Image (cartoon, rainbow, N blue to C red):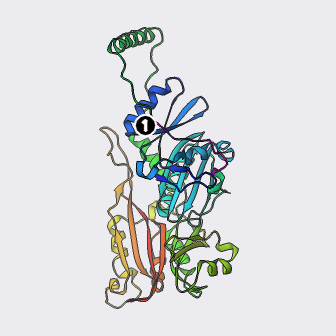
Amino acid sequence: MHITEPLPGDKGARLAFGLDWRAYPVKGAKAERRRYADDFGATHYVEVKVAGEMIGGFAAPDTEEAGKAKLYSGAARIALHDRVKSRPAALVLLQDDQRVHLVFVARGAIRNDEVLSPEDARNRRLDIEQKCLRENLALTTFGSGASIGDVDEGFRAADLLAQKKVGRIQKLPLAIPVLIPLVFIGVVLAVGGNTVMNIVSPPAPPPHESTWQEKYAAALKGRFVVHPPRASALAPQLLALFGKDDPVRSGWEFDHADCGPRGNCSVTYLRAGGTFADFDHDATAFMRPISFERDGRHLTIRGPAVPKVAPVTLASAKDWPAEQELIDLLQTPPQRLSMKAFDLDSHGYKVMLDEARPLLPAPPGPGESHGSLILEGKWEIDGYKWQAPLLERLPENMTLESLTVSLKTEGDVGIHFVAKGKYYVQK
């Protein structure tokens, strides 16, 4: 849970993000509220009424951090904002230095209320986009910040200040024990009432439980519905975007850039004699918004757009190498830049492959047969820009999820990269 600094215009108020949310009926809300509060070990709560349901958020704020401040839920204010509540599904991303406040609202209910790093926020955004595609929900993305990527509409933290009374977080009242005789009478009436109701109106049949094959098909579809880009196509193009210009700008030196599979990269500079005012004065419109970090030594700008490339698709699965073939392909001479017998790892190029795992953790049950299965694994490659031709030789079963580019000025000097992604093989 993260509590913001005092709000402008009301120094006694602060926004809180990172609550646990649940939906329950308006009727009997008091009992449900107490039940969920006990489950979460919460001391505070906030409730939002949406379409006949109560959406409750629960938290246990640190008393030292909260102090005597009036706490308001940032997610509640987002969910009730006019531009958000009119959408079937909305994802709001608000960047604050190196943290991103992420709130996902679907049909009025708050499903995600998190405080994440920029990289984790990108991964969570992909998960939510896949979920909306599976549930046939039209998703609108709002937000602001250099590292969050493209959005459908801008949304600033200041947009939450107008709703001054919305989302007040209150302390849970003390639970008052109910008298034992009343509990006994209530239990008897409940049991008797349920028996009568079951006779008059039998309970509905249990919901359909998906088979293992159905779960596997859904998991497989979810991996490729967002068209993950091929690492062999995207990684070299991203590397080509950096290193051509002077690394020093307005007294600030290029430090590193972070790129995801879509949207825009974010570029971080390190102070090299300049000031924030110098950089802000010389910055172009494309580089904005600029995030000046509190340490006084770093700033982050909006970087170049991530190119669109061919995706990894299931249609080419028949041509994917097996896991051992992939290991041999990446860690033996076919991927070397030279035919000379030397170990390329000594030149700063290193390939790391995690073990490929099934898409579903549980194996098929008795009697559930299946054909060939797709396995998924993670990969990471560290190297230098001059080794980009090696990336072009990566097979078509490897996707790119992130690329970090940095300038090394000591030891092995040059443009260094760390590329990460997933690979898929058949079993």
- Residue 157 appears in which quarter of the rendering? bottom right
Quadrant of image for the C terminus: bottom left
232 or 263, which is in the foreground?
263
Q: What SS does tag 1 mark? A: loop
Residue 415 visible in the shown view: yes
- What predominant SS class does the magenta segment belong to? loop
Q: Residue at label 1?
A: 210
283 or 420, which is in the foreground?
283
Please tell me whether residue 14 is drawn above or below residue 330 in the rendered image: above
| Residue stretch rendered in magenta on the structure | 160-171
Residue 207 visible in the shown view: no
Please tell me whether residue 186 is drawn above or below residue 211 in the rendered image: above
Residue at figure coordinates x 70%, y 73% from the top left? 285
Q: Position of residue 295 (x, y in %)?
A: 49, 73
Residue at figure coordinates x 63%, y 78% from the top left? 277
Q: Position of residue 180 (x, y in %)?
A: 32, 15
In this rendering, would 137 be left or right of 422?
Answer: right
